[in-house]
Amino acid sequence: MTEPKRIYLAGPEVFFPQGDHRAIVGTKKRLLAEYGLEGVDPLDTDLDLPADTPDRECGLRIHLANRKLMDSCDAIIANLTPFRGLSADPGTVFEVGYMIGQGKLAFAFSMDSRTYYQRAGQRPRDAQGHAVEKFGLADNLMIEGGIEESGGRVFCAEPGAPLAWFDERLFRQCVEALVNRRP
């Protein structure tokens, strides 16, 4: 029997309270296992950070540990639900780009059914006079374009769905699309 494909699970859940994080990631890993895949969470590291480690060093060591995890994975499924602002978590966006840059498949979901343009106020210019993208995409064109170019897709919650951070059905759509794209 061959090893299951490893799927990196990117998203802002790493910032959630421990119980919420464990519940969401546990569900993601269970769903992936149903398809013979292994879910890899950014917190699945053996990183030892003593309490006296300077903050900057902690951050850089976490970055390297997460990069090693991504290097060991075959694809990524990312939560692009807007986090702390108009767009997806910037760390998640980096992770998506990093995986795509390695030629790996990327899939994503957003629990916000609105387009980037709708979230930005549905005006061609923002309050500072800067142009706002109006392409009907879930987020910035480089994020969704890169995901599609990798062979993946962004799945969004149905309009009117309650805004939440995770939906098992939506995540399953990502997993099924990934499984159907596998060689």
Image (spheres, rainbow, N blue to C red):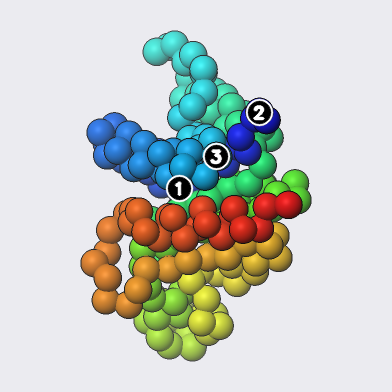
Circles 3 and 2: CB atoms closer than 8 Å: no
Residue position for label 3? 36
Q: Residues within 10 Å of mark 1 (few under 14, many from 20)?
A: many
Res. 31 in view: yes
Distance of mark 1 from mark 2, alpha carbons?
A: 30 Å
Q: CA distance from mark 3 to mark 2?
A: 11 Å
Q: Residues within 10 Å of mark 2 (few under 14, many from 20)?
A: few
Q: As drawn, which residue projects farthest toward the front? A: 1
Measuring from the top left, give residue 178's x and y in whole percent.
59, 55
Helix, strand or loop at label 3? It is: loop
Q: Nearer the viewer, residue 145 or 40?
A: 40
Query: What residue do we see at 44% from left, 76% from top?
Result: 115
Identify residue for label 1: 11
Mark nearer the N terminus (3 vs 2)? 2
Which mark is on residue 29?
A: none
Q: Hey, what amino acid is under mark 2?
A: Met
- Would residue 9 be found to the left or right of residue 2 on screen? left
Q: Which residue is mark 2?
A: 1
**Residue 67 visible (yes or no):** no
Type of amino acid at the residue the image marks with label 1: Gly
60 vs 72, left or right, is left
Q: As displayed, is residue 31 above or below residue 174?
A: above
Q: Amino acid at mark 3?
A: Gly
Taking the spot 48% from the left edge, 71% from the top edge, the residue there is 138
Q: Say what secondary structure mark 2 lies in.
A: loop
Q: Earlier in the sequence, mark 1 or mark 3?
A: 1
- Mark 1 and mark 2 in contact? Answer it, CB < 8 Å: no
| Disc 3 versus disc 2: nearer the observer | 2
Q: Quadrant of residue 122?
A: bottom left
Residue drawn at (48%, 19%) of the image: 54
